Image (tube, helix red, strand yellow):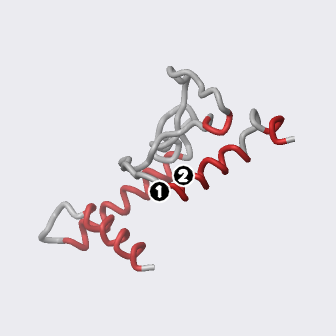
Amino acid sequence: MFIFFFRFLHSLKQKVKNKVRVEGSICEAYLVEETSTFASFYYPDHVETRRTRIARNIDVGDRSSSTPPISIFNYPGRAIEKSITYFLNQKDFDVAQLYVLQNCEEIQPYFE
């Protein structure tokens, strides 16, 4: 709950341009944001606005790399955060391996 409040405060602090009149600066930035959002509804869809912009973490276009040979690893997308290296212990590795084997279409004929 508190994280949303702090994010909201952070967005308000970013809108402050005139530190002498903080409230007026926030109000002005809010009015500009609301006006531009309202006006964007009247633009054609091919005009890129804040409302029609594609999110950062959505892949569009062709992939230059080849598709993985196993279907369970063929999900498009990019990492949102910085990647970290994590080493699995034997129990976690066995669980992950069993999950992949049970949910992969190419392996299902071998289970029957």
Q: In this view, does 71 lie to the left or right of 92?
A: right
Quarter holding the C terminus is top right
Residue type marked 1: Asn
Q: In this view, does 67 lie to the left or right of 34?
A: right
Q: Nearer the viewer, residue 77 or 28?
A: 77
| Structural distance between the alpha carbons of marks 1 and 2 | 6 Å
Describe the element under mark 1 as helix, strand or loop. loop
Q: In this view, does 70 lie to the left or right of 28?
A: right
Residue type marked 2: Phe
Residue at 42% over, 73% down: 4
Q: Residue 82's spot in the image, x, y percent? A: 36, 48
Residue sticking out furthest to the left = 20
Residue annotated with mark 2 = 93
Classed neighbour count for the residue bearing mark 2: other residues with Cα under 10 Å, few (<14), some (14–19), many (≥20) = few
Q: Residue 62's spot in the image, x, y percent? A: 55, 22
CB atoms of marks 1 and 2 within 8 Å:
yes
Describe the element under mark 2 as helix, strand or loop. helix
Q: How many marks?
A: 2
Query: In the rendered image of this protein, does residue 1 appear above or below residue 78?
Result: below
Classed neighbour count for the residue bearing mark 1: other residues with Cα under 10 Å, few (<14), some (14–19), many (≥20) = few
Residue at 66% over, 32% down: 70
Residue annotated with mark 1 = 89
Q: In this view, does 18 lie to the left or right of 46?
A: left
Place residue 18 in its image quadrant: bottom left
Residue at 47% over, 56% down: 89
Q: Residue 107's spot in the image, x, y percent? A: 75, 36
Residue sticking out furthest to the right = 112
